[in-house]
Amino acid sequence: ILYESPHQLRKTLQELADLLQGSIIQGDPSLKLTGVNGLEEAGPTEISFAVPPYLELAGKSRAGAIMIPEEGELKGPQALIRVKNPRAAFAKLLMLFRPPESVESGISQYAFVHPTARIGKNAAILPFAYIAEDAEIGDNAIIYPHVYIGRHAKVGSDCTFYSNVTVRENCIIGDRVILQSGCVIGGDGFGYITSEGKHTKVLQTGNVVVGDDVEIGCNTCIDRATVDSTVIGKGTKIDNLVHVGHNDVIGENCILVAHVGISGSVTVGHNTTFGGQAATAGHLKIGSNCTFAGRTGIISDVPDNVVWAGFPAQSHVDWLRMMASQRKLGDLVKKVRKLEKLVETLEKKDDK
C-alpha cells in the first residue's frame, strides 16, 4: 500500500522551481504536481530527485519531474529542475507536500499537570501525559500521550516529545528538541561498588542537559550523571537504540547511528560521527571532526580529524589493508602446507 497524503496540494513545475530557487531545463512549466516520492515509488504527478551515481537509473523512473544537481545530466522523458542541493530540495518539498500532522494546543482534561508545573504559551499536552511537580514546559511544545516529565525538569520551546518518552527529574532540555517514542532521558547511570562479591548501587545525583536542535531516536537512553551533568551538545542527532553513559559530554553537531554505545565519562568533540554499533571504553577523550566506521571499538584517546575503523580502532586505511590481507590467509595456509610437505619429502630423501 503506497502512502497517500491527506493534503490535496497541487503545484506547477514553475512554482516548485521558484520555491527551490532552481531552473527548469526540460518539461512544461505548467505541469501540475501533487506530491513528492522516491525514484522507484514516484508516479507521473509526483516529483523526485537524483544524484550521482543514480542519474542514469533515474531516467527509468515513472516520476513526472526530477530534481538534479546543477552539474548533473539526465537522459529521460521527465521534466527536470536543476537545483543546488537535490537532497535539501527534497526535504523542503516533503515539508510542503507532507507536512507534519497539526496538534491542537491546550491541556487535555485526561493529562496530569501538577499545580506547580509551568506550561508555556500554545503548548499541547495530550491525554495521559504526566507533568510532575515544578516541571517547566516551553512555548509551542507538543507532549504526546504517556510522556513523563519528572520533577523540576525544564523543557524548552518548540519541542516535540512522542509517546512513551521519559524525561527524569532535574533534566534540562533545550529548544526545538525532538524526542522519539520510548527514549529515556536521565535514567540512572550504571554505577556500582563491588565488595566481597556483592554490587552496591552508587546514587546517581546528577542530570542530563540536552542542547538546542537535538533529535534523539526511539528507545535511546541517555543516563544521568553520578554528579554534575551528562551533556548532549546542540545540533547533535542520535539514532534509535543508542546508549550514552553517565557523565558523558557529547559535542555539538555530532551523529550517533543506531546501536552506538558510549561508556561512562567519555568526552567527544564537535562534528564527530559514530557509525552503527561503534562503541567506546570509558574515561576517554575523543576529538572533533572524527569519523568512526560501523563496529569500531575505541579503547584509547582519539585526536581530532581522524577516520578510524576496526577493533581495536585504527586508521581506516590500515584497517582496509588488514582486511585485504586476512582474505588471503586461506591461500597462504594452503601454500604453507604444500611447502611443509615438500620439505618433509626432501628431508626423507636426504636421510636415505
Image (cartoon, rainbow, N blue to C red):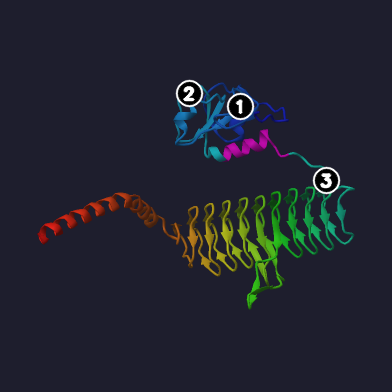
Which secondary structure is most common in the magenta stretch? Answer: helix
Query: Residue 61: image x %, image y %?
Result: 52, 26
Q: Mark 3 = which residue? A: 105
Q: Which mark is residue 325?
A: none
69 left or right, relative to 263 = left
Label 1 residue SS: strand
Query: Residue 60: image x %, image y %?
Result: 49, 25
Q: Earlier in the sequence, mark 2 or mark 3?
A: 2
Q: Mark 2 = which residue? A: 76
Q: Which mark is residue 46?
A: 1
Label 3 residue SS: loop
Q: Earlier in the sequence, mark 3 or mark 1?
A: 1
Q: In which quarter of the image is the C terminus?
A: bottom left
Which residues are drawn in magenta? 88-100
Query: Residue 106: image x %, image y %?
Result: 85, 47
Q: Which of marks 1 and 2 is nearer the N terminus?
A: 1
Query: Residue 254: image x %, image y %?
Result: 57, 56
Residue visible at 45% across and 36% down? 52
344 left or right, relative to 191 = left
Q: Distance between the residues labelled 3 and 1?
A: 33 Å
Q: Does the magenta stretch include residue 96?
A: yes
Vertical relation: 184 (above or below) 84: below
Residue visible at 59% across and 59% down? 252
Q: Residues within 10 Å of mark 3 (few under 14, many from 20)?
A: some
